[in-house]
Image (spheres, rainbow, N blue to C red):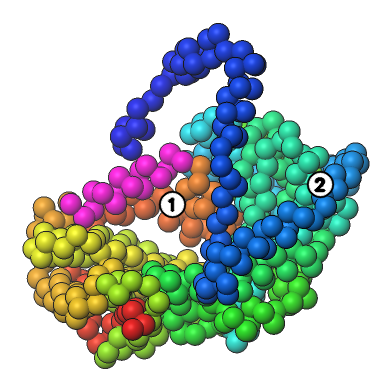
Amino acid sequence: ATADNDVVTSPAQDLALFEEAVDGLEAATVSRALQEAFQGQGPLIFLATPTMVEGGEAAVLSAYEAARQTEVAPPAALSAVEWPYSQFGAPGKVVETRDVADLDTVFVHFDNGVRLTIKPTRFQDDEVLVAVHVGDGLQSLPSDTQSLAWASQALVEGGLGKITAEDMERVLASNVYGARLRVGDDAFTLSGSTRPEDLDVQMQVLSAYLADPAWRTEAFARIQAAGATIHEQYEATAGGVLSRDLSGLLHSGDRRWTFPTKAEIAQATPDDLKAQLAGPLSGAPIEVIIVGDTTVEKATDAVARTLGALPARADVSRPEAAPVVFPPPTATPVRRTHKGRADQSIGYVAWPSTDFFADPQAAREAAVLGEVLRLRLVEELRESQGATYSPSVNYNHSYVWTGWGYISASVEIPPEGLDAFFTDVAEIADDLRRNPIDEDELERARQPRLERIERARVGNDYWLSELARTQTDPRRLEAIRAVIPGTERVTAADVQRAAERILSPDRAWKIEVVPES
């Protein structure tokens, strides 16, 4: 809280403030306030559309009045619904337990192949985070077929074989749970956030989506309908166009990362999504991460009675994934256009590096180089030139894809400033290659990164992410242990060597997003 400049109030203070607010409050007073709130003119009608409605305001009002004439029947009485996924069979048996004492983490291996990683914490009272990693994610998909990751949430919204998503919300209304599906580089991940007393329910929900997904077509249709206008939303701003296209471009058009066209969204079917997801979700290896306000015993028991009780799966799989290629350098920037403000554009430049495990310490040196690059750009653009915008610098060294990583710099700027931005970046990169930084600049770059890592390590989200795959890839455990001491070891000479290795002008890939007009 101190690091975030937050002021903390105690539970006693919160109670006193509440009691003061409700002192003497009566139900009749609340009722009158509600009645007053719903008085006045209205309703107000708001319509957002990418194209002008024929007939304008009169047409909208006419449609509204026609709708008002439609008779509305009262809803049918809701039938009693029970949660049908509390039992998955005989609880799984633990065949191995291993302590990782320095990280306060426990590895559990069940007889059906499921692996469980548990890290009890007290960072946040009543918070337990769960991630169920299944299969190998994008590694298991073909590189020449458009990924259906954009529609993956249709699995969750489609509910389960014995109960719809809407009825799930009703029958589990008194419980805290979540269900989200993400398609990652190395796994399909079902995740949720719960509280200690609802961990059993959380595990039942996620297990049910693996054991008995319904694949209801109406859920896919809702997402597909929203996708019909998604391109117009992206095209309204320079940032939208970049976020839509950048991932595909940085992966040289690999269809696992490209965003689908309007036609591809319109032509996609629920069977296409099922073809990409159903096989891995039903039979691929399972790894569970549980982090938060729980115990090793409770977490193990909850998984034993759910995922641990499912039929046996393969223990570990390592697919022969299609390689990932960074785009070739560009003499002039790739150009994309947007339909938004005429004074809005984005310049972006990226240099390829390599994956994390090729040289973990070199990856940490590159990260500090990225922080130095950010400082230099801020000083040049904001302090020297007096610009009101701030540059963004990112660095990515893949844990999954051999040889893939990059450092990038970008800025949102008026179109007339793009050439100067690319020139400034090239000059800063050249100086970083040729000349060592001083100790003051090294400290100003390295220390904020260390502080961000330290802050992240006292949060459950950090550990939920970092502990993934640690049971089957011990290098990831070493990466967790070494991130702070390894960053502290980075010297000015290391930063210069990283710049010489990465920031070469003949390796830079550039893109600009400019107004359509």
Per the rendering, the mark at residue 480 is 1
Q: Is residue 417 magenta?
A: no
The amino acid beneath tag 1 is Ile
Question: Where 478 falls versus 251 (above or below)?
Answer: above
Amino acid type at image mark 2: Asp
In magenta segment, residue 454: yes
346 sits to left or right of 199: left
Give the main secondary structure of the magenta stretch. Answer: helix
User: If you read the primary sequence from the N terminus, does the residue marked by circle 2 or circle 1 appear first?
Assistant: 2
Residue 153 falls in image quadrant: bottom right
On the question of residue 358 being in view, the answer is no
Q: Are marks 2 and 1 in contact (CB under 8 Å)?
A: no
Identify which residue is drawn at 29% across, 65% down.
Answer: 393
Q: Residue at x 49, y 85 (%)?
A: 253
- Furthest toward the top, the residue is 24
What quarter of the picture does the C terminus occupy?
Answer: bottom left
Magenta stretch bounds: 444-459
> Is residue 168 visible in the rendered structure shown here?
yes
Q: Quadrant of residue 384?
A: bottom left
Q: Looking at the rendering, in which quadrant would you find the N terminus?
A: top left
**Tag nearer the camera, 2 or 1:** 2
Q: Secondary structure at mark 1?
A: helix
Query: Percent x, y for residue 212?
Result: 83, 58
Residue picked out by circle 2: 167
Residue at the location (43% across, 52% down)?
A: 480
Q: Position of residue 148 (x, y in %)?
A: 64, 74
